[in-house]
Amino acid sequence: MKVWESSEAKAVFVIVHGANEYHARYEWLINKLTDTGFHVVMGDLPGQGESPKHKGHIDSFSQYITAIEQWFERAKHYELPVFLLGHSMGGLVVIQTMLKRNLQVDAIILSSPCLGLVKPPSKMKHFGASLLNKVTPTLRLPTDLAPGTRCQEMIKRDESDPHIVKKVSVRWYYELSKAIEDSHKKVKKFPNVPLLILQGGEDLIVAKEAVAQWFNQLTIDDKYYKEWPSLYHEVFNEPEKERVFHVAKSFADMHVNLNGNQLP
């Protein structure tokens, strides 16, 4: 777990990264947040990042939820509004955490949350994974993901980063699939917390139709869905990221002010 502090913080962001990435890929976003009045708390999810115990593997999705709870507890120390920001699988982790723990956060931002895949494994592969999960759950296979961003600088950066996970275990895929199914099944039980979804219109990884379907079924009072037509999966790493950040910051500022915690 790492903490980045702002000199005049009005709130705290807990950032939850996606699969096959870790905190170092969020340097630009973290700097933007701290420069505009937000502390940031973030860590590397189990099986990901600089020092994973089991690279690309988890025994249970609950390991992710436990990590988020710890980061949230750290954020609470500031006694300021707390926002969760989850990207891709991190967005799914935030959804599951709220369904199972209902953390008392002030607002949530989900960036292209993993609620369905553009190219899911075939039924045959899915069935095979279910069997292998019982026999060799730690068997790791290549992710072979489509490009997440159009930003050439980010693509080049990732090519030389040894901490990017490029293989995931059968158990990891099984747990991810269960979490996606559970999130859709229990969508109407999602807590009544202000929510903003930022979705890439040309997402090649997460199925935007599944995200919109989940969003439309929510029974919460304060929800917003913003789709960026030409953007790929990683909206905060796209060439238009300044515009995306402006929308996210405006949403956060609005909910800081609504809670009566604005700076004098």
Image: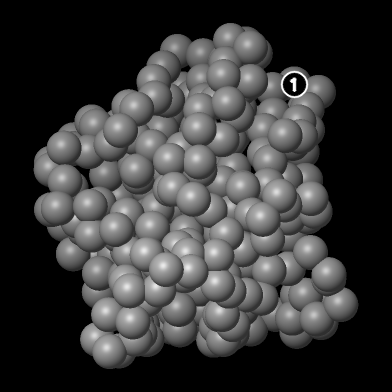
Element type at marker 1? loop
Q: Is residue 190 left or right of residue 74?
A: left
Say which quadrant the N terminus sits in.
Answer: top right
What amino acid type should be assigned to the residue bearing mark 1? Glu
Say which quadrant the C terminus sits in.
Answer: top right
Residue 103 visible? The answer is: yes
Q: Residue at x 74, y 60 (%)?
A: 25
Residue 222 visible? The answer is: no
Residue 201: x and y in percent read 40, 78
Q: Residue at x 56, y 35 (%)?
A: 67
Q: Residue at x 68, y 61 (%)?
A: 55
Specify few, some or many for label 1: CA neighbours under 10 Å numbering under 14, 14-19, or 20 or more.
Answer: few
Nearest to the observer: residue 13 or residue 46: 46
Q: Which residue is mark 1?
A: 8
Q: How many marks?
A: 1
Nearest to the observer: residue 178 or residue 15: 178
Residue 229: x and y in percent read 41, 79
Q: Residue furthest front?
A: 135
Q: With respect to residue 185, does 165 lie above or below?
A: below
Residue 237: x and y in percent read 65, 68
Q: With respect to residue 106, does 184 lie above or below?
A: below
Q: Is residue 69 left or right of residue 239?
A: left
State the image quarter where residue 13 is shown: top right
Q: Residue at x 34, y 43 (%)?
A: 96
Nearest to the observer: residue 244 or residue 133: 133
